[in-house]
Image (cartoon, rainbow, N blue to C red):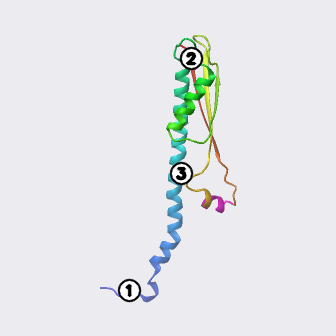
Amino acid sequence: MRKVDQRQQGASAVEFAVIAPLFIALLLSIVEFGMILYTKGMMTHAAREGARYGVVFSTPRRTAGEIETEVKKYLNLSGLTSPATVTVTGAGGNPGDILDVKVSYTYSFLVLPSDINNFTAGTLPDLNLTAETVMRME
């Protein structure tokens, strides 16, 4: 059995103290990026649901307000409770016309705001995410 050099006792603790904050920041960044992707996916699904709701044949045709309400309802059910901007163009058109549903959402960092913003001197902006779906009226 080898004898441990007295000068190297505690070296592991120092190495851990240097590496741990970087590793934790990396893990939190991965979680934050996953949350951003989830938000973008839910926005895309909401825009698609709103467009589908608007293009399906009905008498009378659905209005832009009804489509916007449907999109916001989907966003609320998916957990995105911050206000989103929904723009609907072409609602109430004739068969073959184009309906465009655009959703804009400002994503505020949830996991990393204080640590990363302190490190970057508060220059980390919120992300402006958009999703758009275009369909033809039935």
First in residue order: circle 3 vs circle 2: 3
- Crowd band around label 2 with a 10 angstrom C-alpha radius: few (<14), some (14–19), many (20+): some
Measured as percent of width and height from the top left, residue 12 is found at 45, 77
What span is colored magenta in the figure?
A: 115-120
Label 3, secondary structure: give it. Answer: helix
Amino acid type at circle 2 is Arg
Label 2, secondary structure: give it. Answer: strand
First in residue order: circle 1 vs circle 3: 1
> Which quarter of the rendering shows the N terminus?
bottom left
Tag 1 near tag 2, CB within 8 Å? no
Task: Tell me the residue that label 3 is attached to.
Answer: 32
The vertical placement of 109 against 118, above or below, is: above
Measured as percent of width and height from the top left, residue 46 is found at 53, 32
Task: Tell me the residue that label 1 is attached to.
Answer: 4
Please tell me whether residue 114 belongs to the stretch shown in magenta: no
Nearer the observer, 41 or 13: 41
Q: CA distance from mark 1 to mark 3?
A: 42 Å
Tag 3 near tag 2, CB within 8 Å? no
First in residue order: circle 1 vs circle 2: 1
Amino acid type at circle 1 is Val
